Image (cartoon, helix red, strand yellow):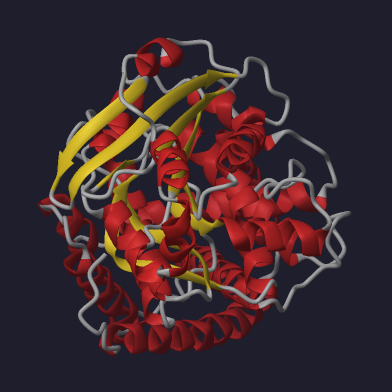
């Protein structure tokens, strides 16, 4: 049997007591240690690829813990095929790692519980590498993340650039949704890269954390574990806490990872609503029992801007369609070529964003060039935004984790609620409009069009600034 790294160190300590202290003091020979934690829930379709990808890294984690929770499929069986010690020949030399598979059974804290269980196993390492059970990284991703983390002790966590591998996706709707999500990830990644590579959210998909930073977070927030169970977005809250503890939260310009995408409307709706709802809880002062409410925290200012942009996008689209239909109904619409400027700028911006993607495809380019795919996807995102705020303002407590799991299994019809509501609202508005006298109708149009016009001009200028902004050679 091969000796473990711990056994080799103890052996060295025993044989060379006079030299052991000098070796510890020589930081130039110190090699950081990385413990990898993979929370896995029903990941039988991807867990083998995830583990194979980690074992194929140029810098292999020193230990890999797969923490399986609440699973009902063959995740444990498939992951167990990789369990045990591995001696690997890599570009950086001979490396050793060991894979452990833990089936913790029914876990009420779900992913958060699995992450905290994994942390308890690797808290003695220098870094914790969090990897989702459906995320496959480029072979040098760990090497890039570790190199930057080691180079600056101020870094509390650093994330890879995320995208989605579209090659295995089948079906027109699934491909459309994945292309939209790829564009959404690209915009998010580029925004963070251009903000001094400050990452507002260290996504759990593939991020490395300093365990010292995690200990500081637990101490300052009086937590027993790094992740708390009462947050819908455990990664956003932890990122906020790391930043508040005085550390940097960064995004790597080199490390890349493909995450699992949502291929159905109901699954995408459940995921986006959970994310947005959780973000609102963090943004809104006094909503969480364990935080004082920090709406103007640096990491949350970005979220407020995202929500304001989405609100304006939704308002302009709904107002434009409403005013256009109202104008046509009384023969008062006058076409102006100036209305073509915003779509043209949007096409240029979407196309440039697609060209910024490192692994772009023809579908990504067409998504930007044709306008209509991006516009349809924006309407879908607006429905998620509306549902999230409606759920939050209703004060109705729901388990968004459970709803997402149900949606991914094909259950639930909540994603149709915005459409049903829109049909009802349109019907009511048409009935009211037809009852109004022509003078009132004309007044509404006279007031409404200038308001929409001003907001559209501001949005178009904002898009133009993004279009001409230097991207400093970054690719996403």
Query: Which of 156/355 is in front?
Result: 156
Q: Is residue 195 visible?
A: yes
Residue positioned 42% across, 67% down in the render: 149
Residue positioned 47% across, 68% down in the render: 25
In terms of image quadrants, where is residue 62? top left
Tell me if residue 254 comes above or below residue 346 in the rendering.
Answer: above
Q: Is residue 476 left or right of residue 304?
A: left
In terms of image quadrants, where is residue 416? top right
Place of residue 92 in the rendered image (x, y in percent of width and height, measured from the top left)? 18, 52
Tell me if residue 368 comes above or below residue 347 in the rendering.
Answer: above
The quarter in which the C terminus is drawn is bottom left
Tell me if residue 179 comes above or below residue 295 in the rendering.
Answer: above
Query: Which of 17/238 is in front?
Result: 17
Q: Is residue 197 left or right of residue 224?
A: left
Place of residue 346 in the rendered image (x, y in percent of width and height, measured from the top left)? 30, 74
Place of residue 319 in the rendered image (x, y in percent of width and height, measured from the top left)? 55, 68
The quarter in which the N terminus is drawn is top left
Query: Which of 394/286 is in front?
Result: 286
Residue positioned 64% across, 57% down in the render: 214
Q: Is residue 323 visible?
A: no
Q: Looking at the image, how many numbered discs can be counted on the residues?
A: 0
Query: Which of 39/142 is in front?
Result: 142
Tell me if residue 200 comes above or below residue 111 in the rendering.
Answer: below
Place of residue 90 in the rendered image (x, y in percent of width and height, measured from the top left)? 15, 44
Residue positioned 27% across, 75% down in the render: 349
Q: Is residue 474 left or right of residue 17?
A: left
In terms of image quadrants, where is residue 217? bottom right
């Amino acid at each position: 049997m091969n000796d473990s790294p711990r056994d080799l160190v103890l052996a060295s300590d025993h044989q060379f007591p006079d030299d052991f202290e000098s070796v510890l003091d020589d930081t130039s020979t110190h090699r950081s240690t990385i413990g990898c934690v993979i929370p896995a829930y029903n990941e039988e379709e991807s867990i083998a690829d995830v583990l194979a990808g980690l074992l194929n890294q140029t810098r292999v984690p020193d230990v890999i813990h797969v923490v399986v929770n609440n699973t009902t499929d063959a995740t444990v069986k498939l992951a167990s095929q990789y369990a045990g010690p591995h001696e690997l020949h890599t570009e950086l030399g001979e490396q050793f790692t060991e894979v452990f598979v833990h089936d913790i059974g029914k876990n009420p804290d779900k992913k958060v519980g699995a992450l905290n269980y994994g942390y308890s196993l690797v808290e003695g390492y220098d870094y914790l590498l969090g990897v989702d059970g459906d995320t496959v990284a480029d072979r040098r991703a760990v090497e890039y993340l570790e190199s930057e983390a080691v180079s600056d002790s101020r870094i509390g966590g650093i994330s890879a650039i995320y995208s989605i591998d579209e090659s295995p996706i089948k079906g027109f709707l699934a491909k459309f949704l994945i292309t939209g999500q790829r564009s959404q990830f690209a915009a998010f990644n580029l925004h963070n890269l251009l903000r001094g590579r400050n990452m507002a959210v260290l996504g759990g998909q593939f991020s490395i954390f300093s365990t010292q930073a995690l200990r500081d977070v637990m101490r300052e927030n009086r937590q027993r574990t790094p992740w708390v169970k009462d947050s819908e977005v455990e990664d956003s809250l932890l990122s906020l806490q790391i930043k508040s503890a005085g550390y940097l939260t960064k995004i790597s310009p080199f490390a890349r990872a493909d995450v699992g995408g949502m291929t159905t409307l109901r699954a995408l709706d459940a995921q986006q609503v959970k994310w947005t709802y959780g973000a609102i809880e963090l943004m809104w002062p006094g909503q969480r029992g364990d935080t004082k409410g920090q709406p103007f925290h640096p990491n949350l200012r970005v979220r407020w801007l995202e929500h304001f942009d989405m609100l304006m996008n939704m308002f302009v689209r709904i107002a434009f369609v409403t005013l256009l239909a109202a104008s046509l109904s009384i023969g008062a619409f006058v076409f102006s070529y100036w209305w073509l400027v915003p779509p043209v700028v949007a096409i240029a911006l979407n196309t440039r964003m697609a060209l910024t993607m490192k692994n772009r495809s023809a579908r990504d380019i067409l998504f930007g060039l044709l306008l209509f795919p991006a516009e349809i996807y924006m309407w879908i995102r607006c429905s998620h935004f509306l549902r999230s705020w409606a759920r939050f303002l209703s004060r109705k407590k729901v388990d968004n984790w459970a709803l997402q799991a149900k949606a991914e299994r094909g259950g639930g019809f909540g994603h149709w609620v915005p459409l049903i509501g829109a049909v009802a609202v349109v019907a009511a508005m048409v009935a009211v409009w037809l009852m109004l006298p022509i003078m009132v109708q004309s007044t509404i149009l006279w007031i409404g069009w200038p308001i929409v016009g001003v907001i559209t001009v501001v949005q178009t200028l904002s898009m133009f600034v993004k279009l001409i902004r230097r991207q400093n050679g970054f690719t996403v």
